[in-house]
Image (spheres, rainbow, N blue to C red):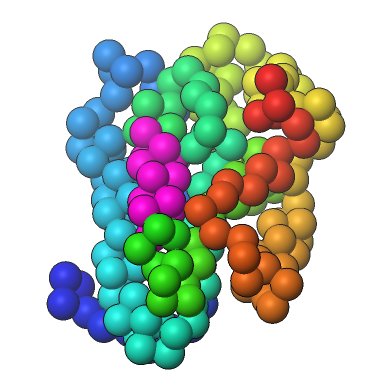
Amino acid sequence: MDDLSLEVDVLVNNAGIQRVSPIEEFDPDDFRRIHAIMLVAPFLLVRAVLPHMYANGWGRIINVSSVHGLVASPFKSAYVSAKHGLEGLSKVTALEGGPHGVTSVCINPGYVRTPLVEKQIADQATVHGIPDSEVVEKVLLQDAAVKRLVEPDEVGSLVGWLTGPDAAMVSGASWAIDGGWSAR
């Protein structure tokens, strides 16, 4: 994949996995796997699409980060550090791509109603010592002002706008869609 070249006008990096564990118990192989999927793969994809975008003088790169790209939470060392890295990659891409008509932004949702979030409820219950039924309220939505999960369509709508003509000057930014979580 290192020499891959893709003819893509819009790239949306959206892959993600999660492992919830204290740092001292975090499996180093899981840490590396999370970084490979959520930071190295986006780098390789951005690298592969830029020549085509530069040649056309236009391109849009949307990196689906997370509120965890802006703030940290305990027990998520790999996820948080990968998302912070994605934030930096996105900003560097914005600076390098701007003169070529390429924009790069991050979208930073809070917890989105997805299988990834559903699967971590039991893990969160275990590390926090609470029943599964209390995880959404006491852990996932604890810091959000708006007490509900983000819907996938809300994220998709923002992606659509950011790739459209009205967002031509939107680059190098991080767009929180987190119910006010990152306002703290």
Q: Most extreme residue toward the left, as rendered?
A: 3
- Residue 89, horizontal then vertical, whole percent: 36, 51
Q: Is residue 90 magenta?
A: yes
Quadrant of the rendered image containing residue 144? top right
- Residue 162, horizontal then vertical, whole percent: 65, 66
Q: Is residue 53 left or right of residue 164?
A: left
Q: Is residue 32 above or below residue 137?
A: below
What count of labels does the image hold? 0
Q: Which residues are magenta?
A: 81-93
Which of the image's four quarters has the C terminus?
A: top right
Is the stretch drawn in magenta largely helix, strand or loop? helix
Measuring 52% from the left and 72% from the top, which residue is drawn there? 60
Quadrant of the rendered image containing residue 85? top left
Q: Most extreme residue toward the top, as rendered?
A: 129
Measuring 44% from the left and 85% from the top, which residue is drawn there? 57
Observer able to see residue 171: yes
The answer to which of 170 and 141 lies nearer the viewer is 170
The answer to which of 37 and 170 lies nearer the viewer is 170
Q: Is residue 146 magenta?
A: no
- Residue 100, horizontal then vertical, whole percent: 41, 76
Measuring 29% from the left and 24% from the top, which residue is drawn there? 26
- Residue 55, horizontal then vertical, whole percent: 36, 88
Q: Is residue 136 above or below residue 51?
A: above
The answer to which of 133 and 37 lies nearer the viewer is 37
Which of the image's four quarters has the N terminus?
A: bottom left
Observer able to see residue 14: no
Q: Is residue 148 left or right of residue 102?
A: right
